[in-house]
Amino acid sequence: MSDATLSELTALAIKFRDERDWKQFHNPKDMALSLVLESAELLELMQWREGDALQSHLAANRSALQDELADVMFWVLAMANDFGVDLGDAFKQKLLKNAEKYPIDKAKGVSTKYTNL
Amino acid sequence: MSDATLSELTALAIKFRDERDWKQFHNPKDMALSLVLESAELLELMQWREGDALQSHLAANRSALQDELADVMFWVLAMANDFGVDLGDAFKQKLLKNAEKYPIDKAKGVSTKYTNL
Amino acid sequence: MSDATLSELTALAIKFRDERDWKQFHNPKDMALSLVLESAELLELMQWREGDALQSHLAANRSALQDELADVMFWVLAMANDFGVDLGDAFKQKLLKNAEKYPIDKAKGVSTKYTNL
Amino acid sequence: MSDATLSELTALAIKFRDERDWKQFHNPKDMALSLVLESAELLELMQWREGDALQSHLAANRSALQDELADVMFWVLAMANDFGVDLGDAFKQKLLKNAEKYPIDKAKGVSTKYTNL
């Protein structure tokens, strides 16, 4: 996993956008919509396959897998930037919230949603 | 924007998962599915509002906005980890690809998809 | 709007599937996944545009719009069929539930979610 | 499967909407966004489960399953109505297109996307 910082990647994303004068299109709704579309493209790689057949398919489509993860990342970084969210802090705070919703002794080894724990 | 590194946040995500013995549930399809669900929750914050009304709504729901971004980030990091993808490198490589698909002189100021440029 | 019945359209969908021996692939998760993917393709037609520009774009892409609606419909019908759900009855029952969640006197002219009414 | 016609269900959906004066909110983008959100809620019912465990879960959540299918249907019908699309005709025409993209002799028993057939 990468030593890249969120601020470094965010700067690259914003530079890419500014060079193309695209900020004018990046309203919150279309950005979130774009995030969903890219997430769906990642999900499409998983369609109709399971287990070993899926793993083989992902290995054969490794470049697409990396690209789709990167496309999702782009929108997360751009949204965090535009909303002034410190994504690292937000992530750590959310993990703390999740740790309360899913205490280890109750959640260990079960996939039950916290509302049913 | 945060100085947190991807490797630091990934380690936190995997620690959270391992403490709960949840890796057993994290097959590629359900992870990508979860990414889509979290992206959809972020999109839901944008539903039925535009412009200033949307900005006010997001300001009033700032905590939810941060949480949803963090939830999306969790799945991106977990997937990159499990697939052995260096997310920072993947991101930089994809930006280079996008720069070819959207050359500045053609793409500047227009939202046209590259297939129609 | 069409006089076609749900049962007629469902029969066409299932015939199409059976001729290709595709039922073997249609497990619940991949069907719901496919529904999301087709819904996302419909949403993509709305990306980066608003108001008159969006209406013009949809008019220029009318065939794609019809096709995406049809693709979404395919999965709704196939899932209802495979789960043994009477979609017409389910629809009417859900409207009754929604009428309770959104009583006219409270919901009229406001887009507030029922949990906040 | 139901003998309900699309026109009958559409009329119910539009009546529900008009009683609440909600057409003002139903622009194309938010409608498509809502369709994606409802599709995602249906997909969420499939999360973290496979095979028999998933079937049992769906049986235990049959009411939710029916409701989510109905919610998806609502947006398909409302969009078709607002765009002036005859959904029954669109569906039949799309099946014909799909029959060309997936000829029986090539597509039988394989889940390959038409672009790779």
Image (cartoon, coloured by chain):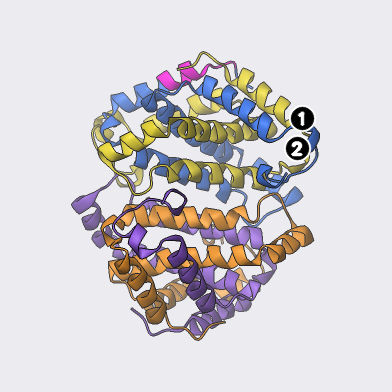
Chain colours: A purple, B orange, C blue, D yellow
Residue drawn at the location 22% of the way across and 51% of the way down: A51
- Residue B15 in the image: x percent, y percent? 33, 73
Q: Under tag 1, what secondary structure?
A: helix
Who's the residue at 64% across and 24% down the image? D10
Please state the chain letter of the residue tagged with numbered disc 1 in the rendered image. Answer: D
Residue located farthest toward the left when viewing the structure as drawn? A52
* The C terminus of chain C, quarter of image: top right
Q: Which residue is labeled 1 in the image?
A: D18
Q: Which residues are magenta?
A: C3-11
Of all residues shown, which one is farthest toward the front?
A105
C86 part of magenta stretch:
no
- Residue D30: assigned label: none
- Say whether residue B90 is left or right of residue C54: left
The one nearer the camera, D42 or D81, is D42
Examine the rendered structure and indicate whether residue D68 appears above or below residue B21.
Answer: above
Q: Chain of mark 2?
A: D
Q: Are marks 2 and 1 in contact (CB under 8 Å)?
A: yes
Task: Locate residue B103, reporting x and y percent.
Answer: 54, 73
Image position of C9 (left or right of C92): left
**Residue type, numbered disc 1:** Asp
Instruction: Tell me if B19 is positioned left or right of B94 in this view.
Output: left
Q: Give the crowd class for mark 2: few <14, some 14-19, many >=20 residues within 10 Å.
A: some
Give the prevailing secondary structure in the magenta stretch.
helix
Is residue C26 visible in the rendered image? The answer is no
Task: Tell me, for residue D22, which label it has, or none.
Answer: 2
Q: Position of residue B116 (x, y in %)?
A: 55, 57
* Residue at 25% over, 30% down: D105
**Crowd around label 1: few <14 · some 14–19 · many ≥20 (10 Å):** some
**Amino acid of disc 2:** Trp
Quarter assignment of residue C111 = top right
Extreme-top residue of the structure: D3
